[in-house]
Image (cartoon, rainbow, N blue to C red):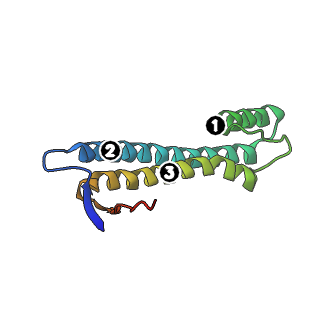
Amino acid sequence: MDKLFLFRFAGKNVYLPKLLGSFIVFASVLFFFQSSALMFESWENIKQVNYCLHEAVSGAEIQQCQSMAKNAFGFFVRPNQSVLSNKQFAIALISPIASMFSWIAVLIVGVMVYNLDKAVIPVKESVLHKGKKKRTS
């Protein structure tokens, strides 16, 4: 014989999933905007370092461009380099873009937690009836 129970995460007066979900949504939206601002800032820094490398003539100007790239992105620019390579572009932009997508995923989880009070999970329980065994002697 099988019994079916309905398991609810929240009742009429329990608002903990909504409270937790709203905090997760609020924080993820803030961090999403912060990571998107970081992405746009990285793009502006890439353009500035590229312009600096393109216009650099003397060794002092090249060293200034190298220090700009090292401070902004953490990678070394070679002295004979006139523009940033594709790999350097990727190093500079992938981290903020990945962070932005991560916060979108956290936002989706927050919305799911917020709507968790409407979720009802059916739980199935199997009950076995044991009969008495006859002893044969």
Q: Nearer the viewer, residue 116 or 130?
A: 130
Q: Tell me the residue at 33%/54% (across/down).
A: 111
- Where does label 1 land, which residue? 72
Asked which secondary structure carries label 3, the reply is helix
- Number of the label disc, if any, that sits on residue 53: none
Q: Nearer the viewer, residue 137 or 24?
A: 137
- Type of amino acid at the residue the image marks with label 1: Ala
Q: Tell me the residue at 27%/64% (across/down).
A: 4
Q: Which of 76 and 22 is in front in this view?
A: 22
Could you tell whether 70 is left or right of 58 in the image? left
Residue count near mark 2 (Cα–Cα under 10 Å), binned few <14, some 14–19, many ≥20 = some
Residue count near mark 3 (Cα–Cα under 10 Å), binned few <14, some 14–19, many ≥20 = some
- Where does label 2 land, which residue? 26
Mark 3 or mark 2, earlier in chain = 2
- Where does label 3 land, which residue? 102
Q: Where is residue 90 in the image (x, y as percent from the top left)?
A: 68, 53
Could you tell whether 50 is left or right of 96 in the image? right
